[in-house]
Image (cartoon, rainbow, N blue to C red):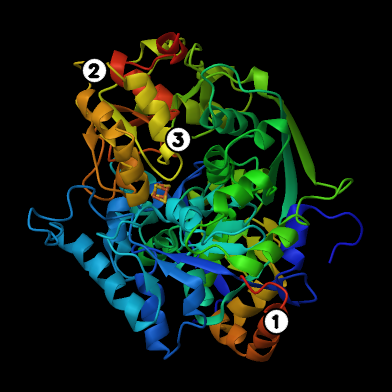
């Protein structure tokens, strides 16, 4: 995985709450056996609406997406994270996420940043005209108008993101502990 | 490890921690892994690229379901029929290659045991109380009905489990939903879970594992419990749990992958220690009186948008929050409904009985009981029954349920996810309405522009007969 330190640029002021992963990437796009190219199907139903933010030339290529509560709810499809990445989005800012989505995002080096409602409202305003900066190291979201919001992130996730660590590789290095667990448990619960 | 009285969730969690980090993240051992064709290709590919193996193929079971067409799979000579859509065919072919290549047990499209992963797991005894179980599908929560800690994962996690048989997780908060009393006449587990989601909201369970307890669940069949736990994710919860009891053990006994002989006795003795201890504490408690639940239907595009069947479409302005008012307006626009409209006057052109929520034998029996001797209304253009597995299908045929459905004007299909997610050819046409026993009424879920009303199997059958959303109790008297 490539290390992630900061994301800077225009933000798409989407703002919608309860954006489910069927909206992010409809089922017909899930027939792929690859992680690439899903940006074409991203937000397909939203993009069918005239005047939608995704096709607004002001936000083309924006690396940040701002959304409402419970972003990424519904289906566990990681295709949602792949589709966002394929669109060029490197960070989402929202008041809350579904557990599965935030995990999927993290594993693809996509930041899922949680900020309170008031901060989201403010950033939605700023996004209309100006870029937004996210600094993972210092856990801040800033604008050129002196706004400065700090966010929480799991320290382990932060460490992996900053250093581009592969989680499977890290866990495989714990083979001794895993084998030890299996050996200890086998006689206790042989049916498992 | 929690000291003092522990919840069911805490007991399962504690028994599976391989290693605990300082920040509270745990490496958790996974006992069972279900794999299907849609969320696994990229995971197997990643293993291949890094030269990694599947650590415990014996704990992994692969079954295609999501994308598999539900039309006949064999021709008159018993030869396998090709899948028309080349992308779907390829996805299935990739699973059929990956499973043997990595040594994983595979149940194929023409095997009698094939079906929706969440129907097959319990049915085969692959799902066991006290086990941790994962699958690349959010409705994995269903398996919690048997007292397994079960949750959906993304493809990177599928890869992680295949390679290491573990996951890195943080313990969730715990919520106890207590329901006491008897469900009323014509009220089913599906109505109860829709009612619960309406009560706590589509994000009400986010960050929690829900334990369902109380006399209503104790008296409920294992199949009903599966329906309830299945939809935990629609309330945002990672998992649902119901304490294993004699009903659970009776259900599992003799299933092909369940423990046998001395192991069985040992397992049951262990399973009896799992229920939450008296005095165990939860982070949140919700109490519901079963008698207050009516046959329930959704009006909007979130599973929290529920009303009793005798109710009306709400006025968006009646919601307290601005965001919800906006969402409700959008929903009504999409659904083609107006505030104040009576739900039981809403016509439907499509009926879907199926999905991992409601495709087990009890569900088909409940629908058939309503349909017996009746016909679908003339405005109903498509009525599908898609059994959850080949075994459910055979059982239903042995009981003559297929005849009842076919005579009522339904199509009797092969097992799979079907119109639940509209990925294979089974879809609801744009602008048309569907009374569906599935679990998601999201925009476009059953096909672009499809308008979904979530209901119980009996309510779906009633809608088929009258051609509109209907209070099934009227047809049951
Ligand atoms: S039936 Fe629907 S919800 Fe269940 S596993 Fe299939 S797609 Fe998912």
Same chain assignment for discs 3 and 2: yes
Residue B173 vs residue B240: left or right?
A: right
Q: Nearer the viewer, mark 3 or mark 1?
A: 3
Q: Which residue is mark 2?
A: B375
How many residues crowd mark 2 within 10 Å: few (<14), some (14–19), many (20+)?
some
Tell me if I can see residue A50 in this picture: no
How many residues crowd mark 3 within 10 Å: few (<14), some (14–19), many (20+)?
some
Same chain assignment for discs 2 and 1: no
Residue B242 vs residue A82: left or right?
A: right
Q: Are marks 3 and 1 in contact (CB under 8 Å)?
A: no
Real-space Cα separation, disc 2 to disc 1, in angstroms: 58 Å
Dividing the picture into quadrants, the one containing residue B218 is top right
The x and y percentages for residue B151 are 57, 57
Q: Which residue is mark 3?
A: B362
Q: In percent of the image, x 51 and y 44: which residue is there?
A: A15
B416 and A158: which one is in front? B416
Chain on which label 3 sits: B
Q: Which residue is mark 1?
A: A181
Chain on which label 1 sits: A
Q: In percent of the image, x 37 and y 10: which residue is there?
A: B345
């Amino acid at each position: 995985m490539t290390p992630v330190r900061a994301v800077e640029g225009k933000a798409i002021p989407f703002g919608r709450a309860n954006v489910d992963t069927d909206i992010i990437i409809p089922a017909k796009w899930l027939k792929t056996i690859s992680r690439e190219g899903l940006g074409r199907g991203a937000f397909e139903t939203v993009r069918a609406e005239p005047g939608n933010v995704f096709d607004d030339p002001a936000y083309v290529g924006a690396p940040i997406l701002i959304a409402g509560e419970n972003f990424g709810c519904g289906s566990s499809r990681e295709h949602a994270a792949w589709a966002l990445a394929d669109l060029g989005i490197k960070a989402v800012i929202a008041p809350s996420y579904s557990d599965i989505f935030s995990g999927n995002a993290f594993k693809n080096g996509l930041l899922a940043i949680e900020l309170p409602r008031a901060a989201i409202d403010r950033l939605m305003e700023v996004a209309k005209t100006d870029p937004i900066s996210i600094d993972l190291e210092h856990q801040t979201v800033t604008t050129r108008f002196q706004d400065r919001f700090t966010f929480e992130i799991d320290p382990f996730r932060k460490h992996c993101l900053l250093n581009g660590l592969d989680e499977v590789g890290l866990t495989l290095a714990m083979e001794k502990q895993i084998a030890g667990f299996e050996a200890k448990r086998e006689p206790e619960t042989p049916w498992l | 490890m929690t000291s003092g009285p522990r919840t069911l969730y805490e007991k399962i969690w504690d028994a599976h921690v391989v290693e605990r980090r300082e920040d509270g993240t745990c490496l958790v051992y996974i006992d069972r892994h279900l794999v299907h064709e849609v969320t696994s290709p990229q995971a197997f590919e990643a293993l291949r690229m890094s030269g990694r193996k599947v650590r415990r193929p014996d704990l992994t079971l692969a079954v295609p379901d999501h994308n598999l067409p539900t039309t006949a799979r064999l021709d008159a000579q018993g030869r396998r029929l090709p899948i028309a859509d080349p992308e779907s065919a390829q996805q299935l072919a990739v699973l059929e290659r990956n499973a043997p290549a990595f040594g994983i047990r595979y149940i194929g499209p023409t095997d009698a045991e094939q079906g929706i992963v969440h129907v097959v797991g319990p049915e085969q005894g692959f799902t066991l109380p006290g086990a941790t179980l994962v699958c690349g599908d959010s409705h994995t929560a269903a398996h919690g009905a048997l007292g397994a800690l079960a949750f959906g994962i993304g493809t990177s996690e599928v890869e992680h489990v295949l390679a290491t048989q573990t996951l890195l997780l943080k313990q969730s908060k715990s919520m106890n939903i207590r329901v006491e009393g008897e469900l009323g006449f014509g009220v089913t587990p599906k109505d109860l879970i829709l009612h619960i989601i309406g009560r706590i909201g589509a994000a009400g369970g986010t960050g929690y594992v829900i334990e369902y307890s109380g006399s209503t669940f104790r008296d409920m069949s294992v199949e009903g419990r599966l329906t309830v736990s299945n939809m935990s994710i629609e309330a945002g919860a990672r998992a649902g749990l119901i304490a294993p009891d004699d009903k659970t053990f009776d259900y599992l006994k003799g299933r092909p992958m369940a423990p046998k002989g001395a192991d069985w006795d040992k397992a049951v003795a262990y399973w009896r220690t799992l229920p939450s201890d008296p005095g165990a504490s939860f982070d949140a408690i919700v109490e519901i009186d079963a008698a207050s639940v009516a046959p329930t239907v959704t009006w909007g595009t979130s599973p929290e948008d529920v009303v009793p069947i005798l109710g009306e479409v709400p006025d968006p302005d009646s919601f307290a929050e601005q965001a919800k008012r906006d969402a409700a307006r959008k929903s009504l626009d999409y659904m083609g409904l107006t505030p104040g409209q009576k739900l039981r006057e809403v016509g439907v052109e499509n009926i879907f009985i199926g999905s991992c929520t409601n495709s087990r034998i009890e569900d088909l029996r409940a629908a058939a009981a309503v349909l017996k001797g009746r016909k679908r209304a003339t405005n109903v253009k498509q009525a599908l029954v898609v059994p959850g597995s080949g075994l459910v299908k055979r059982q239903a045929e042995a009981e003559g349920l297929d005849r009842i459905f076919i005579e009522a004007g339904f199509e009797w299909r092969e097992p799979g996810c079907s119109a639940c997610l509209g990925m294979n050819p089974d879809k609801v046409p744009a602008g048309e309405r569907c009374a569906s026993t599935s679990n998601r009424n999201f925009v476009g879920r059953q096909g672009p522009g499809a308008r979904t009303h979530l209901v119980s199997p009996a309510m779906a059958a009633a809608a088929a007969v009258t051609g509109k959303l209907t209070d099934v109790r009227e047809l049951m008297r």
